[in-house]
Image (tube, rainbow, N blue to C red):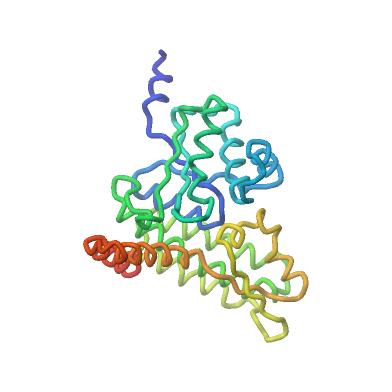
Amino acid sequence: MTALAQVSATREPTTYVPHMSDHAFAVAAAMRACGLLAEVLPRPDSETLRIGLSLCKGRECLPCFLTMGEIIRKCREPGFEPANTRFLTPGSPGPCRFGQYSVLQREVLDQCGLAGVEIVSPTSENAYHGFGSDPTRLRALAIQGIMAVDLLQKLLHEHRPFEREAGVTDRVYGEALADVVIAVERGGGKLLTAVMRKAANRFAPLPRNDGSKPAVGLVGEIYLRLNAAANQEIIRSVESAGGYVVMATFSEWIAYTNWSRIKRSRVRHDWKDVGKATLLEWYQWNV
């Protein structure tokens, strides 16, 4: 084995985060802040969907097709190194197929001769606790970043339908998102607060809701709600039709997973876990 091959085989594997939404960039930044190599996969498109459909049975859900396509598409890139790659696929208990994504992905990867590729699957059953060497800090940073992106998207959807110059709001949003990613990677906290103040000042001069357009609430399953490829750019379609979108946030899901953990633990009379989950909830929203 050459020296180059030895380095390649022993280096920290890169964790690829599915591009469900722009929140993925904040999650990857939090992972890098905690010493993990992390990148966001490219935005899914029709080719991603085609690959996913070709490897599934057709009875799965749309998010399953897209996430499967993202993983296999990355694996087919020239120079791909299975031993130095892992994919982040969070899971969840309950009736949703979401909890089975990692099982199916593992099966497909093995069938494709990619047994060396690791699937990392933290679960909502314990509120996604335990990923990385410092999971508490990683979780707190990720939540800071996710909430920041939630706020940026709220500003984007409030301003873009009323813009006078096409593309200006998207540009301001993109610049603010890049600043958020840098702030999270550098530890979040006061630096992220300063970045969000800067973002607010960037958006402030832009035209916003003047009461001339109807509001359309966008709710439903989190992946379809947030992923433009899955929902066929429904937000831009509403804006083109003369409306503006008010959307449920990503952080709503995080609050729900912790609430459901506390509820399950109370049913089991696991008061120790109730206490842990309550403390974790306080920490994630206050630190």
Q: How many marks?
A: 0
Question: x%, y% of residue 211?
Answer: 68, 86
| Position above or below: 208 against 174 | below
Residue occupying image coordinates x 27% and y 65%: 274
Q: Nearer the viewer, residue 190 or 124?
A: 124
Q: Residue furthest right?
A: 241
Q: Is residue 109 left or right of residue 60?
A: left
Residue occupying image coordinates x 61% and y 36%: 73
Question: x%, y% of residue 154?
Answer: 56, 71
Q: Residue furthest front?
A: 268
| Position above or below: 69 against 148 | above
Q: Nearer the viewer, residue 110 or 169?
A: 110
- Dividing the picture into quadrants, the one containing residue 133 is top left
Quadrant (top left, top right, bottom left, bottom right) of the N terminus? top left
Residue occupying image coordinates x 38% and y 34%: 12
Quadrant (top left, top right, bottom left, bottom right) of the C terminus? bottom left
Question: x%, y% of residue 159?
Answer: 64, 74
Q: Residue furthest top?
A: 1
| Position above or below: 148 against 4 | below
Question: x%, y% of residue 74?
Answer: 58, 36
Q: Residue furthest bottom?
A: 211
- Dividing the picture into quadrants, the one containing residue 225 is bottom right
Q: Is residue 209 left or right of residue 254?
A: right
Q: Nearer the viewer, residue 147 or 33?
A: 147
Residue occupying image coordinates x 48% and y 46%: 89
